[in-house]
Image (cartoon, coloured by chain):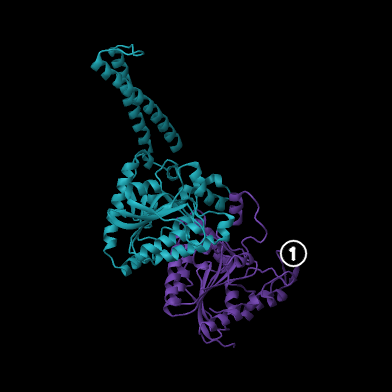
Amino acid sequence: MIRNILEQADKVDAKLAVLSKSAKKHTIMLTRKALTSESKDGENASSEDISALLEKEREEILHLQGLKKDLLEQCRDLTPADRVVLARLSNRPHITDFIDALFTDFFEQKGDHLYDEDPSIFGGIALFHGIPVTVLGHRKGSTVEENMACRFGMPCPEGYRKAMRLMGQAEKFGRPIITFIDTPGAYPGMEAEEHGQGEAIARSLAFMSHLSVPVIAVVTGEGNSGGALALSVCNRMLMLENAVYSVLSPEGFASILWKDSSRHEEACELMKLTAADLYENGIVDEVIPEPRGGAQTDPVSVYRSIEDAIARHLTPLMKMSPKEITADRHKKFRKL
Amino acid sequence: MQFSLRKNMEEELKEDPFITCKKCGRRSRKSQWISHYYACPVCGKLKNVSASYRLSVIFDKGSIRLQDQNITSQDPLNFPGYKEKLEATKDKTGLMESAVTATGKIGGQKAECIILDSRFFMGSMSDAVGEKVTRGIEYATKHHLPLIIFAASGGARMQEGIFSLMQMAKTSDAIEEYSRNGGLYISVLTHPTTGGVTASFATLADITLAEPGALIGFAGPRVIEQTIGKKLPAGFQRSEYLYQHGFVDKIVPREDLRETLMMLLKLHGMKVKEA
């Protein structure tokens, strides 16, 4: 259902873009006529004609804007399966957008300094409200080339070892850590297995559990399996309204339980993977609202909400002692 | 409740006196299987064994004390059909969960032992498994005991969704705490160890041992084949393969396990003597 709505909204958007361009052109023509009272070649139409046309266009624009609003209104009651679609949209804001919008002076750090650089984990040092922080997360990429290089956000062991390197430095220099979670899971490939995918994730979990600096994880898209958990052992877990977080992708879940991955929508209903479900179960600490129709319809408002939420949670955490911070995180996971 | 090797042998000898090997298909006398520690007397293929059998193999006779026997899954998602399946599995296996925790003595040295029994939901990680494993580790931390974990798992318990996933963080946290307190953790990877168990406590040991021929990995072979679009080479993700790639210290046949454990405890300054 959500796919239809989004498709229609896209069509309306395209029409709107054409109309507003032409309306702009007509406005300029009118102004020029009024100023010079001369007509150039190819602009034979009278001011009245252009005015009438412009009026019509403006009406059409208003109508379309209303239509779009109505369409997005239909996104009021989304099913879990709808949210999975939204969480995976390629035009949903990604980690690079969040870093640009929320942080300043970003310095990217590369490689695990052991074996390789994994672009599916993106991170470095930056300032958040003037405070040095380490920021990192999964990167899916925005273009096809980036998607391929990042394996659509599925890290190899090198990615997790790079994350540990960055987080270890954060601890050394007393920087809080902010992670962005958006991955279909750890990469299931031959080399990933040879290089110890399981071991890398396990180390990351154990390592993060004992970090003495505050860790805030923000689930922004889909967070699946150990691949997502490996960056989310945190003091506070924040989650965008339409993001999903689960033990496995709904397709994988259906495939394992019923040997039929096409039953993924049914799986979505059972898995309790939405932000609201996870908040209710005490796993997520705050749900960050999204504009109607998903984060991609108004990314700027989403950036502002995330920034506000991080600041709100970070302030009290930064007043805690290193021991209190580790104990606070231990308490969060021990009770689950 | 206590187990001893002799009692198990007597019980099992009453049933069908032959066992068919799943690999080579040869039928051999049960007594022969038992004398080979449940390895096929013909081809050496290991048979999956119960947690109680494993305890009886490594611990001194009469020293085993089971812990937390009443922890059982809470069905946190109210998953359709799950409760019934749990009850049926409990009846069939006589276990409350796949994880069995116990203390016992190895050559007189007290140790904590945690075993995942693959007969119970393929040793998959449920909230109860995570809780039991964590309590076992915490007990070892508190009483400064060496820790031995036999991992065997198909991965996450799907019916428990996100709660299954969170057990990975909980158990890894407990291992890290145990390790920072100077505890010795020996992990024994058995067939199969995959998914969330591989990606948490099973691979965080000081000494990692594996049984011969066990499947050990994060992603399952079928998923990998679908992703890369080709067949995996023979022996991929087996103990020997991990040993070659540097993730296992030693592959230990069952008959040598107790002796290997005794040696490792001795090397860590513990007093061990053969009874």
- Residue A336, visible in the rendered structure: no
The reply, left or right, for residue B28 in relation to residue A116 is: right
Quadrant of the image occupied by residue B47: bottom right
Image quadrant occupied by the C terminus of chain B: bottom right
State the count of labels.
1
The reply, left or right, for residue B176 in relation to residue B43 is: left
Q: Nearer the viewer, residue B243 or A182?
A: B243
Q: Position of residue A172 (x, y in %)?
A: 36, 66
Look at label 1 and name its amino acid.
Answer: Gly
Q: Nearer the viewer, residue A14 or B81?
A: A14
Residue at 36% of width from left, 65% of height from top?
Answer: A171
The chain assigned the colour cyan in the figure is A
Q: Where does label 1 land, which residue?
A: B25
Q: Chain of mark 1?
A: B
Q: Residues within 10 Å of mark 1 (few under 14, many from 20)?
A: few
Secondary element at tag 1: loop
Q: Is residue B2 above or below residue A319?
A: below
Quadrant of the image occupied by residue B8: bottom right
Q: Is residue B94 above or below residue B161?
A: below
Q: Is residue B87 above or below residue B146?
A: above
Quadrant of the image occupied by residue A299: top left
- Residue A78, visible in the rendered structure: yes
Furthest residue to the left?
A35
Q: Position of residue A63 (x, y in %)?
A: 33, 25
The chain assigned the colour purple in the figure is B
Q: Position of residue A176 (x, y in %)?
A: 33, 60
Q: Position of residue B176 (x, y in %)?
A: 44, 70
